[in-house]
Every structure is written in structure tokens, then in C-alpha cells.
Amino acid sequence: MASTPEGRRLTEEHRQAQQDVRDDFLTEFLALWALLDTARLDDTGPGWVRAVIRAVAAYRTLSAETATRYYWDFRAAEAPDSVARPRIPGGIEEVTSRPDTVPPPAGPRTGRPPRQQRRERNRTYPRAERNRQAERELDRAIERSGIRWDFDEGSIARPSRGVTIEIPELDWSERDRKVEISLNITGPVGQKSRIGRGESPDRARDASFVESSGVAGRHVLTGGRRSLLTLLQDDPQARRWIRVTDGDPCAYCAMLAGRGPVYLTKKTASFSAHDHCACTAEPVYHLDAPWPGRAAEFRKLWDEHIKGKYSGKKARQEWQRLYRQLQREQRQLEVG
């Protein structure tokens, strides 16, 4: 939780920045969606999955970079007198760059202050050689699809040399396998299943787009969430972390935010996120600091209407009913 105005500003900027990462990814996802031909799912499905996995990996690294930069800036604002710096596993990753001027954080081993670097006005991918191969696969998938591209191919990010920044080096192999399975289920397999149940191809395709984009966007933001929590677990100054939502979260995310700064241990350190979830985490260096966003409001609602009256599954059901009713009332006031 932020005890300083600077910390609160950084948290809100980080939340918005992660949404920007997801929005940029979804723009590319929309372009890649043309590769998946509902009339030729068996032929175009594999190429589409590979292309989306490639984009997910790139933007996931960008999400990790964004979270790492936020972590160091937030730590400097909230714990300026701390001496020990947390260990960052791994070394230097070549990461994606953004079309703006952003100060990368000081390296944990060098202790140097952030350096202003002018970023190239294009997005780049990590692991240049690996992604040159992925690009060739994408080009072949486009050619096999037989689809005419009506948008500017320059909008699709191409690999090049990027800005380097030290971020937690995590093993994403298991996660990449989950991405592949999820995309197949929500993409080609999901469309065939819906059509087999009698849905029209157009309706099946629309539903598939919503589901697969949500899955892919969640995996993109996992880069920032896991990186931030990895840094916090190795930070001797950090007490805990608290969930940060947007102004109108779903009932599930509101409930988790209302728990307050209870997360840090290995048992509670995983970040629970659903498809289309935009929540982030804020480090806690001062337990008496104000809770971010509407978290305190959600806690008060829970204490007044749920705590001591319901438990387990019943408590969650009652919370959803209460929260959704409050959402409807708020939206009616806004319309009126």
C-alpha cells in the first residue's frame, strides 16, 4: 500500500500501463484473428495458434518490464532509506520497447540510478533468433490461409534489437503449454464444438473471439504479475502485497481486493486472475497506509453484510448477489 502521494500515483500509472500493454496486444490479436478461417479450421488453426503464442510471449515480456520498472520506482518512493536490494533471479533479458521515453530501473547488482533512454517507435520481440524463426512460421501461416490482408502489415510487430532491462527470468515453458491448450480449446476446437451443437458459424466465431482473446490477454498480463510477486518475495523490506482493481471490477476481484494486504507467503503469493481481468498488485511497505482504489469500500461491505452471517460457498454467493445489485443501482444513477 502506498503511504506517499508519489506511490499512489505510480500504482495508478502502473495499472493503466498494464492495460495499455493488453490493449496493444489485443490490437495485434485482432489482426491475427483473420488467420483463423472458420470454414478451414483444421488447416488454419495450427498456424493461428503459433502466431498468437508468439505475440503472447512478446507482450508478456513487455508486461514484465512494465511491472519491474514500477517496482523499483515504487520501492524508491515508499522505502527510500532501505539499503538492501532484493535479489533478481537470472540475468539480462532483451525485451520489448515502447514508443515513448521510459526510464529503466537501476540494476539490482549495480545500484546505478535509472537512465533515460529514447525508445524506438516500434515494438520488438525478445530472443531475436528464436523469433526470426517464429516470423517465418507466421509468414507461412498467412500464405497457407489464403486470406487477403487489408490492413497495414507494418502494424504487426517485427523483431529487432530492443532495449535491455533486468527483469526476473522465469521459466515460462509450462505456461506456454497452457497457452497453447487454451487457445486450441477456445479457438478452432471451440468453434467446431459450437457449430456441432447447432450454432451458426458466425455466432460460433464471435463467441470464440471473446473467449480466446480473454485467455490470451490473461496470459500476457501474467508476465507483469509473476515478475512483480517474484521481486516482492525476495525483498526483505516488503511486508505484503494488496490487490488493485479498476473503478468497476467484477464481484470476484472486488472480494479479493477487499481482503486487504494479506498476500505474501508462498501459499498466498499466486495472483488469481480470470479472463479479461485487469487487476494488478501493489507492494506493501507500511501496513498502516491507505488501501488503494476501492479496496477499503469492498472490505466495509463484506464486514457489514457477509462477515459472521455466511461462510464458504454461501458467503461468496451472497457477496455476488449484493455486489451485482449495488452495481445495477450505481449504473441506474449514472444513467439517470
Image (cartoon, helix red, strand yellow):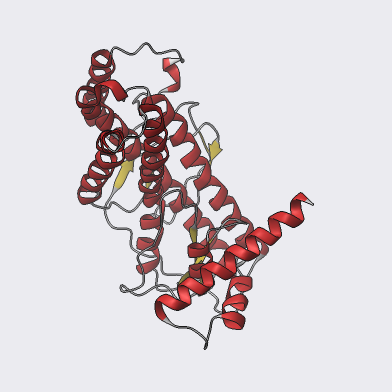
Q: Quadrant of the N terminus?
A: bottom right
Determine which quarter of the picture holds residue 149.
Answer: top left
Asked whether residue 71 is in view, the answer is yes
Q: Which residue is drawn at 41% across and 32% down?
A: 203
Q: Residue at x 20, y 22 (%)?
A: 43
> For this view, does 317 lie left or right of residue 292?
left
Q: Which residue lies furthest to the bottom in this view?
A: 308
> For this view, does 282 lie left or right of residue 274?
right
Foreground pick, 62 / 27: 27
Asked whether residue 163 is in view, the answer is no
Determine which quarter of the picture holds residue 8.
Answer: bottom right
**Residue 179 vertical position relative to residue 146 in the rendered view, above or below:** below
Count all numbered tags in the image, as a single digit: 0
Foreground pick, 63 / 274: 274
Q: Which residue is drawn at 29% across and 29% down?
A: 51
Q: Residue at x 54, y 81 (%)?
A: 306
Picture coordinates of residue 238, whole percent (x, y):
45, 72
**Residue 194 vertical position relative to residue 78 in the rendered view, above or below:** above
Picture coordinates of residue 215, whole percent (x, y):
36, 45
Picture coordinates of residue 283, whole percent (x, y):
49, 66
